[in-house]
Image: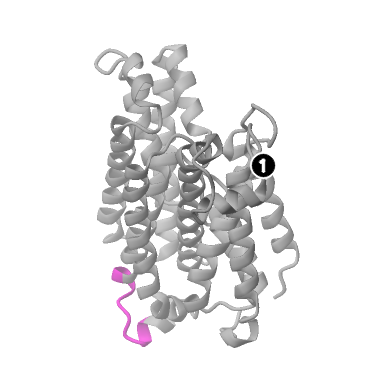
Amino acid sequence: MALSPQVNRQWVWPILLILCVLLFVLDLSLGSVNIAFTDTFHQLVGGGEANINHAIIFKLRLPRALAGIIVGAALAVGGLLMQSLFGNPLAGPSVLGISSGASLGVAMVVLLGGGSVSATYLSAVGLGQGAVVVGAALLGSFLVFMAILLLNNKLKDAVSLLIVGVMIGFLTNAVVAIAQFFSQPELIQDYLLWSLGSLAGLDFSQLSVMAIMVGLGIAGALLLAKPLNILLLGENYARTMGMPIRQLRMLIVAITSVLTAATVAFVGPIGFVGIAVPHLVRKIFLTANHWLLIPACGLTGAMLMLLCDIISKLPGSQAVLPLNAVTGLLGAPIVILVIINRRG
């Protein structure tokens, strides 16, 4: 798609911003206990009373909604980077096995840590929230990234890197499957609950760490906007422009790894958002200019994750759906419709 000028779609930005604010307040209002939209808004601007609604909003729902914004932005930008690097419409932030590496790290702690790290301790610190689980996920992601870094020097093109990343994902998933086979049933259940993804239970210190990592990743992506635009014209053309392709490829992978590791470590592996949002944003803005696509993907990804969180809580009910189930229900149709409607 040609790099169309940004000015043609300037009117979309205020609409997206308003929708994002509305979804944010709505996410804080709805849940097992519904709070009036106006009351939630007054609480946010400091005009509400310090009652039970205040405690529900600021202690339970605000961290969850903020986590949704951060995770949605990270996954959407990561997916955009991978689709731009590989020229593959189905590429997502987990395509290089970084997400699988995080899952492997968690599996080693949860599934095989029954003796040295008791299941009682893991439950006490909060599965998916405790420092042990988060640290294991980050370590697993880092090890996979280092493997890709070493292999990148021996690979000639992005397609080879994509294949290697997919194979690394298969390898890590195979190890996790073996660990599940030899693990105890209750530990398998704990791991499966983590793998379903959840925004609940995070505190502000964890949100701060995740926000810093994601902020650095998105800032790095913006710094690469011009090289990414050139890369859309092909690696051969980029080489004639004097771009160091192998180094650029590694920078893109490194930034995507940071974005993916930050989200998977704290909320578990979340699917489809990173694949669907870049397609949706291109359809809305009718451009392939990364100066526009990167912030647009961040904003749209945050909106989609807030919408998924609202649906997952089944407003008015005590039940909470797995987040991955909701992202799949919303994300997959978006990708199908965009692919069907593609031209050229």
Q: Where is 76 relative to 68, above or below?
A: below
At label 1, counting other C-alpha atoms closer than 10 Å, the crowd grade (few under 14, some 14-19, many 20 or more) is: some
- Residue 316 can be seen, yes or no: yes
The structure residue drawn at horizontal position 52% and vertical position 79%, both measured from the top left corner, is 289
Quarter occupied by the N terminus: bottom right
Quarter occupied by the C terminus: bottom right
The structure residue drawn at horizontal position 44% and vertical position 77%, both measured from the top left corner, is 231
Residue 254 or 193: which is nearer the viewer? 193
- Looking at the rendering, the stretch of residues picked out in magenta corresponds to 239-247
Picture quadrant where residue 135 is located = top left
111 left or right, relative to 297: left
Residue 212 position in % (x across, y down): 32, 56
- Residue 90 can be seen, yes or no: no
Residue 105 position in % (x across, y down): 33, 34
What amino acid is at disc 1?
Answer: Ile
Q: Which residue is the site of mark 1?
A: 311
Q: Where is 208 relative to 55, above or below?
A: below
The structure residue drawn at horizontal position 39% and vertical position 26%, both measured from the top left corner, is 126
